[in-house]
Structures are given as structure tokens and as C-alpha cells.
Image (spheres, rainbow, N blue to C red):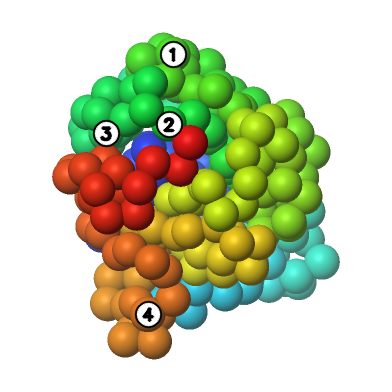
């Protein structure tokens, strides 16, 4: 199954982490990671909406969770967003909100994502670059959310956070007083439970029509 993230296809991450796993396993003198088992673990992590995927992969394929950091560093070298992998509802969504809100990218990503967003026409809409590799904090840490709010010059109750995970997006944002949108693609589960669906303020499967819902139902956060 191909999964899509909030902005870019999550297959970009899948390719990167599998390449990293294979390189580390080759250095250990063992065969490449089993793809079916990888997908099983990946889908289980998506369904659970908790825990570290890279720690789980390190335990399963590299012999121990203590190799998570090693896997993380190796993945960074391969994690890119090629042209054509941005979801086609992103730019229409941003255009619909342009000049009506302040928009920020709040993401656990490498610095190269900024260049990809510049290439794909997203950068002109971005007021705050809350990219973890640049800022030095990662979701779900409240420091990253607080840093972005401060840069945007808004209070938590004036802000809406859109993300595809409960544990690193919806829950930490709600804890700080932000309103939340859960985007059911990418690392979101295929079949969320009723309990999971009750956590965010809004649940959507795409960005199509979301701008109108945010402005009409929640109100402009700016």
C-alpha cells in the first residue's frame, strides 16, 4: 500500500528508511530487510498511533532498539522529496488561505525539505519554518510548538495544527490549547477507531475543502 503524508508522499520516507536498513544490515553481513515484515510493522505502528517506528525497526532488523539513533542518522542521508511527490491538494489549500492566516511548516523533517518546498511552490506561503532539523526540537515536544507560535505571533487558542498523527500532532497540540485537524493519510491508520476519531476537532481525508471549513466553522486563527 502506498501511503501519503500531509504534503509529500510517505513513500519518500519508506524508501529512505529501507535503504538505510539494507545498508546497515549489509555492514552486519546479513540479507536486506524483509519487505513484507517491514510493511506489517509500519502498518501496526500507524494503527497504534504511538511509539517510535525507527526503534521498532531497529529492534526487528538490526538486533536492538539501541541502534535507533544509528538508523536515524543513516536514514537522513536518503530522505528526500523528489519532484512530483507533493500531494496535489496542497497548493490549492494554501492559495485559499493566502493572506487570511499566517502559515507555518511544523515538521520532523530534514533541512532539505525546505528546498523541496521552495521548488514546488509552497515556500511563498510559509511564514514560519518550524523544521526540526533547523529549530533543534522535534514533535511532540512542546518546545517546537511554542517556538512556532512565538514566531507567528499568535496565542495557542488562535492557532490550528494540521497533522496526520495523534501522538506527535493532535495530542501535543491540544495539550497546549491549539485546535487540531487530523489528516487521515500517511502515518494515520487506514481504519481509525471511534476513540481516535474523537480526539481532534476536525477529521479529513484530504485538504480539499478544508480551508473553507477552517475559516467558516472554526474561524480565522489570525
Identify the residue at horizontal 53%, vertical 16% (top origin): 115
Q: Which residue is mark 3?
A: 93
Quadrant in which residue 174 is drawn: bottom right
Identify the residue at horizontal 66%, vertical 61% (top origin): 176
Q: Which residue is mark 1?
A: 124
Please say whether residue 137 is visible from this viewpoint: yes
User: Is residue 130 rendered to the left or right of residue 170?
Assistant: right
Badge number at residue 217: none
Picture coordinates of residue 148, whole percent (x, y) = 66, 38
Asked if the residue at tag 2 contacts the one at tag 3, i.e. Cβ–Cβ closer than 8 Å, the answer is no
Q: Which residue is mark 4?
A: 198
> Which part of the image, by quadrant, shows the N terminus?
bottom left
Cα–Cα gap, marks 4 and 2:
26 Å
Asked if the residue at tag 4 contacts the one at tag 1, i.e. Cβ–Cβ closer than 8 Å, the answer is no
| Mark nearer the N terminus (3 vs 4) | 3
**Are there few (<14), some (14-19), or many (20+) residues within 10 Å of tag 1?**
few
- Residue 179 or residue 168, whichever sits in front: 179
Identify the residue at horizontal 72%, vertical 47% (top origin): 146
Q: Which residue is mark 2?
A: 101
Picture coordinates of residue 4, whole percent (x, y) = 32, 49
Quadrant in which residue 74 is drawn: top right
User: Is residue 13 rendered to the left or right of residue 66?
Assistant: left
Amino acid at each position: 500500500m502506498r501511503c501519503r503524508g500531509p504534503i509529500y508522499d510517505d513513500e519518500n520516507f519508506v524508501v529512505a528508511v529501507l535503504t538505510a536498513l539494507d545498508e546497515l544490515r549489509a555492514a552486519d553481513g546479513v540479507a536486506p530487510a524483509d519487505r513484507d515484515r517491514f510493511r506489517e510493522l509500519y502498518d501496526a505502528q500507524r494503527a497504534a498511533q504511538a511509539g517510535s517506528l525507527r526503534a521498532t525497526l531497529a529492534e526487528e532488523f538490526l538486533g536492538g532498539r539501541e541502534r535507533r539513533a544509528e538508523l536515524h542518522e543513516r536514514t537522513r542521508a536518503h530522505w528526500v522529496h523528489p519532484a512530483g511527490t507533493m500531494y496535489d491538494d496542497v497548493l490549492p489549500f494554501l492559495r485559499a488561505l493566502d493572506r487570511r492566516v499566517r502559515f507555518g511548516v511544523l515538521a520532523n523533517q530534514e533541512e532539505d525539505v525546505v528546498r523541496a518546498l521552495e521548488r514546488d511552490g509552497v515556500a511563498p506561503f510559509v511564514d514560519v519554518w518550524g523544521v526540526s532539523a533547523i529549530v533543534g526540537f522535534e514533535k511532540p515536544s512542546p518546545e517546537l510548538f511554542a517556538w512556532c507560535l512565538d514566531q507567528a505571533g499568535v496565542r495557542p487558542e488562535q492557532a490550528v495544527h494540521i497533522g496526520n498523527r495523534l501522538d506527535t500532532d493532535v495530542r501535543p497540540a491540544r495539550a497546549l490549547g491549539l485546535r487540531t485537524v487530523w489528516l487521515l493519510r500517511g502515518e494515520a491508520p487506514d481504519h481509525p477507531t471511534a476513540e481516535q476519531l474523537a480526539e481532534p476537532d476536525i477529521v479529513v481525508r484530504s485538504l480539499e475543502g478544508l480551508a473553507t471549513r477552517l475559516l467558516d466553522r472554526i474561524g480565522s486563527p489570525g
